[in-house]
Image: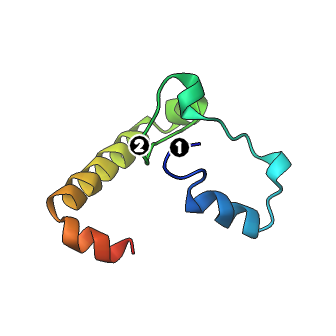
Amino acid sequence: MWRQRPFINEYYVVLENGVKETDLNVFNFDDAGVAMLEDSLIAKKDWVDKNHNLAVKAVRATMKGWVYAIEHQDEAGRIFK
């Protein structure tokens, strides 16, 4: 997936919880021409269409968390250790 880490932790958590690798749709952001460093938000269009307000709140909350982590890197490092 990413150049620095082949798969993120969540990938293995999903597998460890009984989901078969063949049931996953894993794609490489580099192949899609939109390489990401680490995190991304992905949602199905039909879900966003049905839950627009919730989707907006989720994106805003996520961005707020990322900004906080950037501004408080020592604390964020301890949390995500």
Disc 2 crowd rating (10 Å Cα; few below 14, some 14-19, many 20+) is few
Q: Toward the viewer: 69 or 6?
A: 6
Amino acid, disc 2: Leu
Image-quadrant location for residue 32: top right
The residue under the point 28% across, 57% down is 65
| Mark carried by residue 37 | 2
Image coordinates for residue 66, horizontal then vertical, percent: 28, 53
**Residue carrying label 1:** 2
Q: Which quadrant is the C terminus positioned in?
A: bottom left
Disc 1 crowd rating (10 Å Cα; few below 14, some 14-19, many 20+) is some
Q: What element carries label 1?
A: loop
Q: Which quadrant is the N terminus positioned in?
A: top right
Query: In the rendered image of this protein, does residue 77 appear above or below residue 56?
Result: below
Describe residue 6's horizontal placement relative to residue 38 as left or right.
right
| Mark carried by residue 33 | none
Q: Toward the viewer: 66 or 57?
A: 66
The residue under the point 34% across, 46% down is 57
Q: How far apart are marks 2 and 1 (CA)?
A: 7 Å
In terms of sequence position, does the residue under pointer 2 or pointer 1 come before the other?
Answer: 1
| Callout 2–callout 1 Cβ contact below 8 Å | yes
Image coordinates for residue 62, horizontal then vertical, percent: 34, 51
The residue under the point 31% across, 52% down is 61
Amino acid, disc 1: Trp
Residue situated furthest front in the rendering? 4
Number of numbered discs: 2
